[in-house]
Image (cartoon, grey):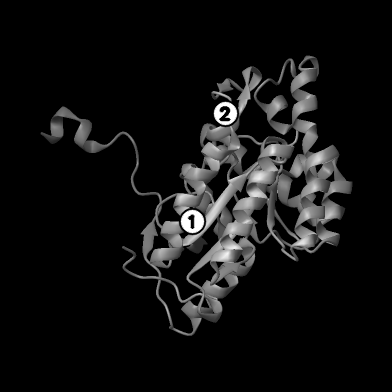
Amino acid sequence: MIENPVPWPNGARCAVAMTWDVDVDSGVNVYNPDRGDTLVCSQSQTRYDVHVAVPRIVKELKKLDMRQTFFIPGWCIEKYPASIDLLLAAGHEVALHGYLHERPNEQSAEDELYWLERCLDQYRKRVGGGAPGWRAPSFAFSKHSLGYLVQHKFSYDSSLMGDDVPYMLRHANGTLLELPTDMTLDDWPHYMHNRDFRFTMPISAPSRAIEVMRAEFDAAWKHGGMWISVWHPYVSGRMSRFEAALELLDYMQQKGKVWFATTAEIAQHVKGLIASKKWTPREEKLPAYESPLPELSKKSA
């Protein structure tokens, strides 16, 4: 089904990156700016991230000798430095996820750039250097985002959903590698239930979410694709859900011929293939068009 499969390392059938969006209580405040301080229950739910879930995840991944990618808002890097240090000490990749989980495509171009540069500043202070990767909060990649990410020399983005394998985003000022995911591989629509986020999914057993994610993995493995999942520690770091996620990882390991990698490692591998002309990605120019579409005008009829 994949016209242009990537040659993965050591003959692997697919690449797997189990990524984590560590939002903590950033969303509580950006979506409720005037009353975030009163939403104490939601604060406790989301701070489960740093108090319980992230240490638990780091501990279990160490047993598996596995390193993964954690996308973190700049404000959370600033506010919860001990968690960042824990992740770095364990060898995990720390990438960026907005500043306060603001949605770029709901901002002016000037505001989007301001918040991007502010989160980059926090990254440099705590992690050092430039951030390798970016995931737009809520996948809210704007028509200006690509230009800003190219300008600030990001290695890759993982916000979009336009392919089963990596592809190249082309902007007037340069290119950026896209490592796509999909909503089927995001734990949020499977699990999230919180009125303060205006998101109340039916509460169900982890087996339902894992069934969907496993089906996506099986297809990626069969056809030589890529499986990049999106998990939130305060959502899937809960005991029963994290047990189910670990069982899914075990299933993948037992199946064999799977390359487990961080998104930065996938980007590095793919860029090496491109440089050596062993593989050529599909390209997509962004922005694709400006609104309103001219075809919507009666004058175009």
In x, y percent, where is residue 228? 54, 55
Q: Quadrant of the C terminus?
A: top left
Q: Is residue 43 left or right of residue 161?
A: right
Q: Secondary structure at mark 1?
A: helix
Measured along the vertical axis of the image, is residue 25 above or below residue 21? above
The residue at the far right in this view is 82
Q: Which residue is mark 1?
A: 217
Measured along the vertical axis of the image, is residue 267 above or below residue 75? below
Q: Which residue is mark 2?
A: 204
Q: Nearer the viewer, residue 66 or 240?
A: 240
In x, y percent, where is residue 21? 66, 44
Q: Secondary structure at mark 2?
A: loop
Q: Which residue appears at 23% of the width and 37% of the height?
A: 294
Q: CA distance from mark 2 to mark 1?
A: 21 Å
Q: Which residue appears at 87% of the width and 47% of the height?
A: 81
Q: Residues within 10 Å of mark 1 (few under 14, many from 20)?
A: many
In this view, the mark in front (2 or 1): 2
